[in-house]
Image: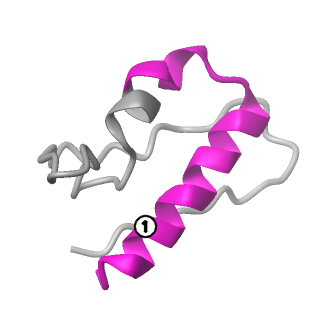
Amino acid sequence: MSVKYYQPIDNVEEVASPCVRNCCLNEQDVCLGCFRNIDEIMAWSKLNVAAKKDVLSQCRQRQQQFGK
């Protein structure tokens, strides 16, 4: 499964959750569905837009590391 992380408009006031409802944590507590770690998942609703975009960037990097 390939997840696409993008936000079509830079000035969006809200960032959608990357959750794809395929939750399965690996040994490092990273979800193999969205590639967020458990701390990012738990904090998502409290993060500001900049922090959410940072998390999405990290998710992209993790996705590439896992070769998905």
Q: Nearer the viewer, residue 42 or 11?
A: 42
| Quadrant position of residue 33 | bottom left
> Which secondary structure lies at badge 1?
helix
Q: Total of numbered circles in the picture?
A: 1
Residue pictured at 29% horizontal, 80% vertical: 68
Amino acid at circle 1: Arg
Read off the magenta span.
42-68
Residue pictured at 37% horizontal, 42% vertical: 37
Q: Nearer the viewer, residue 39 or 45?
A: 39
Q: Which is the main secondary structure of the residues drawn in magenta?
A: helix
| 21 in relation to 6, above or below | above
| 4 in relation to 40, above or below | below
In the image, residue 6 lies at what x, y percent?
60, 62
| 48 in relation to 29, above or below | above
> Is 49 within the magenta?
yes
Q: Nearer the viewer, residue 52 or 58?
A: 58
Res 26 seen here: yes
Q: How is the image coloured?
A: one colour
| Quadrant position of residue 42 | top left
Residue pictured at 31% horizontal, 85% vertical: 67
In the image, residue 55 lies at what x, y percent?
58, 46
Residue pictured at 30% horizontal, 77% vertical: 66
Task: Judge left or right: residue 22 versus residue 9.
Answer: left
Q: Which residue is mark 1?
A: 62
Q: Nearer the viewer, residue 24 or 49?
A: 24
